[in-house]
Amino acid sequence: MSSVYRDPILELKDVGFRYSRGKDFINNLNLSVRDGEIIGLLGANGSGKSTILKLAGGILNPTDGLITLWGNPLHLYKNKDRAKLLCYLPQILDINVPFRVRELVGMGLYPYDVAPEIEVDESLEMVGLKGKEESYIKNLSGGEVRRTFIAMTLLQGAGLLLLDEPLANLDIKYQIEILGLLRDLREKKDISIIMALHDINMALQFEKVILIKDGKILGSGGPETVLTKEHLKEAFDVEIEINRNYAGESYISYINNYSQKNIRVIR
Amino acid sequence: MIFIVSLFIGPRAMSPFALSDMEKEIILSIRLPRVLIAILIGMALGASGALLQGLLKNPLADPYILGISSGASLSAALGIMSGIYLFGKFTIPLMAFIGAIFVSTVVGILGWRRGGLWPERLLLAGIGLSFLFNAALMFIMSVSTDEGLRRAVLWIFGDLSIADWSLIPYGLAFIIAGLIISILRAKALNALILGDEIAYSLGFSVYKERFVLFISIALMTSASVSLGGIIGFIGLLIPHIVRLLVGADSRILIPASALCGGGFLCIADLIGKSIMAPMEIPSGIVTAIIGSPYFLYLLRRRDVLGI
């Protein structure tokens, strides 16, 4: 994967946000996504991951600071133009209407007056859902639903995906599958991704992690440098540390007063 | 076809090939407007039911849940009871329409928060207002000894007998306007069904789309209630039946629900006015009696997804 564009695709500059009648939730936040990056936004529940993603997606408007997309202020984009560049998927994808896979994926073309070249079939093949075109969303597994929506974003053609907890509530098999799929898409379609996570094991799989606590960034970079014992204590309020075994594989050690358990994660 | 058959069958069956002058007159001035109004009302209810179920993300929603019909009934009943026939035969439809538009506005205001309409608020506001208006209506009816009472009750159960050419243009205008708006915004409705955030992410202005769809529902429902009273079943179950047959894509669902709603009400009215002639069964009763068993049959037979 090569890229010429080295300026950030998305940049949050000194962004502040407060919910109505609330106190400041996010203050002076600076964050950028560069071309081809897959960033894990790690933090405990309520740390502000979702809020940051919604700000980045334009769903919430910052009360301070500026967000730029490809160098231009995000809020100045027309809805349809923005939709062709950036796509946000919420954590919960709850569809109680009998849409079929093909119908839902096809909605990715809604921002376009003239449809781009990619076809529904092509995008379904990319996410490995070929043969499920006529299935009802209701009858799919959690991982398949997630992949259906990812296929929709492929059709939408957005180069930047903002995914809120795409791996939550999935079995480990599907977590690995979805992560693999996203990496695959980065190679094939030149897509950059920023996703919220709360699972430290999963964060170990990322090249770049941003650790969040109370709307502030505790650290940003590779998991080894960011996920220090001190940071993890601050972010999650538990005594844990990341260790490496003789083969260089990372694993998490849970430390408490009563027992010491090691859970190993191959990296 | 339903349309043509309806013209020639009725309390007095006629042969389309040998029409006397009087029969021509009956067809032109009584049956034709009535059939047209049945079709219009059915279309409005089918389409606005499909819209509302998507907008509120609630499979149990029907156009009357917003309280529009209760407000219209109350307003019309007041008109009938008070005996003011200010506008002659227009009194009932006009009073009903005023009531319906008034309630739509109130529901819209109550459902409005932070710059947009919120489905849960709309739903609850509608239910709350319905209770209030129904109570008021019951109260009026229980204290009234008016001979207009029977008329009012009939009207509330769906009475197409006031059909008349003069009502058609204005019903047509509102209902067609609502239908066109809703068909043009069907993509936005599909996106809204996926959730506000996804709809926004797909390039739709969520508040604006929801407002436009609400206006179109209010127009169609108000016009239909004022033309023929409250006709159950169509708004709630026709969209479900159509969804089972053609799928959930609003771009097909909305026009298909309109067509099925129109055709179905036309048949129901035909049955209602013929089966016990010269007495008429209100269409609202007929639609429920024929429609519900068919719906239950479909529910048993088909693999019902999503409801």
Image (cartoon, coloured by chain):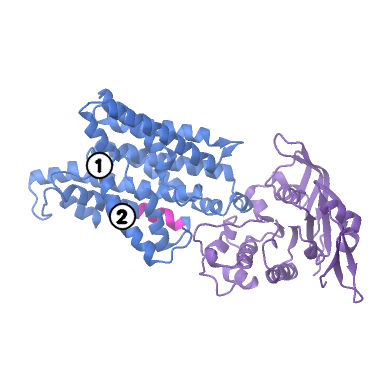
Chain colours: A purple, B blue
Q: Residue at x 67, y 47 (%)?
A: A59
Examine the residues drawn in magenta and state their main secondary structure. Answer: helix
x, y (%) of residue A109? Answer: 58, 59
Magenta range: B251-259
> To which residue does mark 1 refer?
B160
x, y (%) of residue A232? Answer: 86, 56
Q: Quadrant of residue A142?
A: bottom right
Q: Is residue A119 left or right of residue B47?
A: right
Q: Is residue B252 magenta?
A: yes
**Amino acid type shown at disc 2:** Gly
> To which residue does mark 2 refer?
B291
Indicate the secondary structure of the residue bearing disc 1. loop
Give B306 or B72, whichever is nearer the viewer: B306
Indicate the secondary structure of the residue bearing disc 2. helix
Give A142 or A189, whichever is nearer the viewer: A142
Q: Do residues under tags 2 and 1 come within 8 Å of each other at their CB atoms?
A: no
**Amino acid type shown at disc 1:** Leu
Give B21 or B183, whichever is nearer the viewer: B183
Reply above or below: A63 against A67.
above
Q: Residue at x 80, y 50 (%)?
A: A11
